[in-house]
Image (spheres, grey):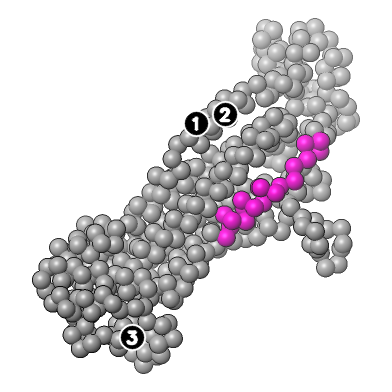
Amino acid sequence: MAAIWSDEGKLATWLEVELAATAAWAELGVVPAEAAARIAQATPPGSERVAELEATLHHDTAAFVDAVSEELGEEGRRWFHYGLTSSDVVDTALSLQIREAGALILAGLERAFVTVSACAQEHRDTLQIGRTHGVHAEPTTFGLKLAGWAFELARDRERIARALEGMRVGKLSGAVGTYAATDPELERLACDRLGLEPAPSSTQILQRDRHAELLAALAVVASSLDAFALEIRHLARTEVGEVQEPFGRGQKGSSAMPHKRNPVVAERICGLARVVRACSLVGLENVALWHERDISHSSAERVAIPDAFLALDYMLDRFAWLVDGLVVRPERMRRNLEASHFLFFSQRVLSALVESGLARDDAYRLVQRSAMRAWEEELDFRELCRADEGIASRVDLASAFDVAAYTRHVDTVFARLEALKEEPLHA
């Protein structure tokens, strides 16, 4: 990913666009075959030489053109960059860079999806208390939680694929998009060589709604990873202790406290998600430009687009590592499940009372009376229900207190996950 967004990677991609344009001009009979052949032998200029020229020219594309032209003969220099404006090269090349970087993001999503799916399958029946508002609700399984992450990663994959398809365009339409100095057929031929579609309409640039959609899609993926990592951080708290990050031999968790084993990678993922979301805001700000274009978008996206890809690529790698090595503690999950005095059975008792013929609000108040006493006096909710004649005389409590009832439909979700895994991982 770093190579794609390096100066060397950018200049090589700019040259790729220039060579495609020259070859198209030659096919149209505008550039002589000999000149096109000479230009085709050009190699990407060194970033140091381009920077040296730019220090005088104050124009990076002009510096690039001059640097390449230095190695061409007179005829090559005459026809290199013929008919093109800077944005023809820069925007089309950016689409190529995004395509290459996007492929790495999709590969990272695939790794994350496979890793999470495997962990979900391993823990499909590992019982865990579900929490709403941070408070014990009803039992779920750790595998079911992870299956939800896998489905979200699959949706993220589709969002990225759609956004990348929107960026699979180039433009060689000239200064304000009128083809006055180029030719629509030139654009078609050059884009075809590059594996892109000609933009149906462009100004001096490709309109930035495409780039905004892409950055927004990257931000959504980052936010998904943020949510997953935040859950791992919560579950790793000392008071919960249901999972733990991998902790390597010789690793130190604190410079002062030798006992510390902190969720630092999960925290790093959460922090970097803020960076990627900030980049998406830059993309939205870049949509509104003056007339056929100004250049206010350029400086901002030279930071935002590479940063978003680099950060997300790293986040995906670390997330897959985190899940693959995650220490899961089923016995602690079971202890936490029982720590709230089996209050999670309250809805099953409520439903059983309603089924027995009791009005729902009357049933609710009856169950709530025992539930509140269990909370306040730290008593076993099950025993309080058994001692309450209003409940015990109406309900089969052995059935109501069957914890297996909470997991009887887990297989339905995992069947859906298996079906999803059989679908192609790239749109």
Q: Measuring 88% from the left and 27% from the top, which residue is drawn there?
A: 379
Instruction: Give x and y (percent) for residue 13.
Output: 36, 70
Which quadrant of the structure image shows residue 32? bottom left
Alpha-carbon span between mark 2 and mark 1: 10 Å
One can see residue 240 in this view: yes
The C terminus lies in which quarter of the figure?
A: top left
| Residue 327 included in the magenta stretch of the image | yes
Q: Which residues are magenta?
A: 314-333
Does residue 289 appear to the left or right of 218 in the view shown?
Answer: left
| Residue 350 included in the magenta stretch of the image | no
State the predominant SS element of the stretch in magenta.
helix
The residue beneath circle 1 is: 419
Does residue 107 appear to the left or right of 230 in the view shown?
Answer: left
Q: Measuring 66% from the left and 32% from the top, which residue is drawn there?
A: 124
Amino acid type indicated by mark 2:
Val
The outermost residue toward the bottom is: 56
One can see residue 373 in this view: no
- In the image, residue 93 above or below residue 73: above
Amino acid type indicated by mark 1:
Ala
Near mark 2 (Cα within 10 A), the count class, few <14, some 14-19 or many ≥20, is some
Disc 1, SS: helix
Does residue 124 appear to the left or right of 180 in the view shown?
Answer: right
Instruction: Give x and y (percent) for residue 269.
Output: 62, 57
Q: What label does residue 413 carry, if any?
A: 2
Near mark 1 (Cα within 10 A), the count class, few <14, some 14-19 or many ≥20, is few
Amino acid type indicated by mark 3:
Ala
Does residue 34 appear to the left or right of 213 in the view shown?
Answer: left
First-in-chain label (3 vs 2)? 3
The residue beneath circle 3 is: 67
Which of the two marks, 2 or 1, is nearer to us in this view? 1
